[in-house]
Image (cartoon, rainbow, N blue to C red):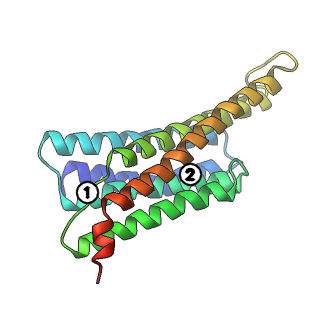
Amino acid sequence: MNLPNKLTLLRIILVPFFAAFLLLDGIPHHYLIALILFIVASITDMLDGKIARKHNMVTDFGKFADPLADKILVMAAFSCFVQQQIIGAAFLIIALFREFTVTSVRLVAAGSGKVVAANMWGKAKTVSQMIAIIAVLADLYLVELFSNGIITYPGGVLKDFVGAVNVVNTILLWITAVLTVISGVVYIKDNFEFIKNAK
């Protein structure tokens, strides 16, 4: 197994540790640990593709496993956010619907002997998701620091800060939702031949 594929597997392995630290409230600085794990996983996503293309290590396994690893990581984060009431279930359902649909098209294409790689819209969707998740995790950690008195603040500042950050996070999440829908529609349109000719 080459280095890019090992990085992809590492991203998958990090997912349960990331989710555990995100949800375990009793561990000091657990949001920070979850944030670091997510950033490390996101960096592996950036590196595996670059290394594979630069050193001619692109494989069919990598084309399929790389976007799958992204889906596992992002869906784990969104599922945790739903449990923590940061996002609504509808947001997660939209993301899951898109990912299951795209994966189904990939499987149909694979049955025809073709491996379909992620397109520009899919990559933009993934980047927007990771930026939004990192922003939410950073927000959670900062609020934790304020709430525990590790960072002191004048009266009213915390409320204003949380309100402003929540607006920014909401905008980022909505951008992600829009790109999720657009990328799914484009993906189906570009690969409709495989659906039409499926046996």
Residue 180: percent from left, percent from top: 49, 51
Instruction: State the CA–CA distance, disc 2 to disc 1.
Output: 22 Å
Q: Residue at x 33, y 40 (%)?
A: 46
Residue at the extreme top: 154
Residue 195: percent from left, percent from top: 33, 72
Q: Residue at x 38, y 70 (%)?
A: 104
Q: Specify whether 103 is left or right of 34.
A: left
Q: How many marks?
A: 2
Category of crowding for the residue at label 2, using alpha-carbon neighbours closer than 10 angstroms: few (below 14), some (14–19), many (at least 20): many
Asked whether disc 2 touches disc 1, contact meaning CB atoms under 8 Å apart, the reply is no
Q: Specify whether 20 is left or right of 44.
A: right
From the viewer's perspective, is residue 18 above or below residue 175? below
Tell me, for residue 63, which label it has, or none.
1
Foreground: disc 2 or disc 1: 1
From the viewer's perspective, is residue 62 above or below residue 171? below
Secondary structure of the residue carrying numbered label 2: helix
Res. 118 in view = yes
Q: Residue at x 28, y 71 (%)?
A: 194
Amino acid type at image mark 1: Lys
Q: Which residue is mark 2?
A: 77
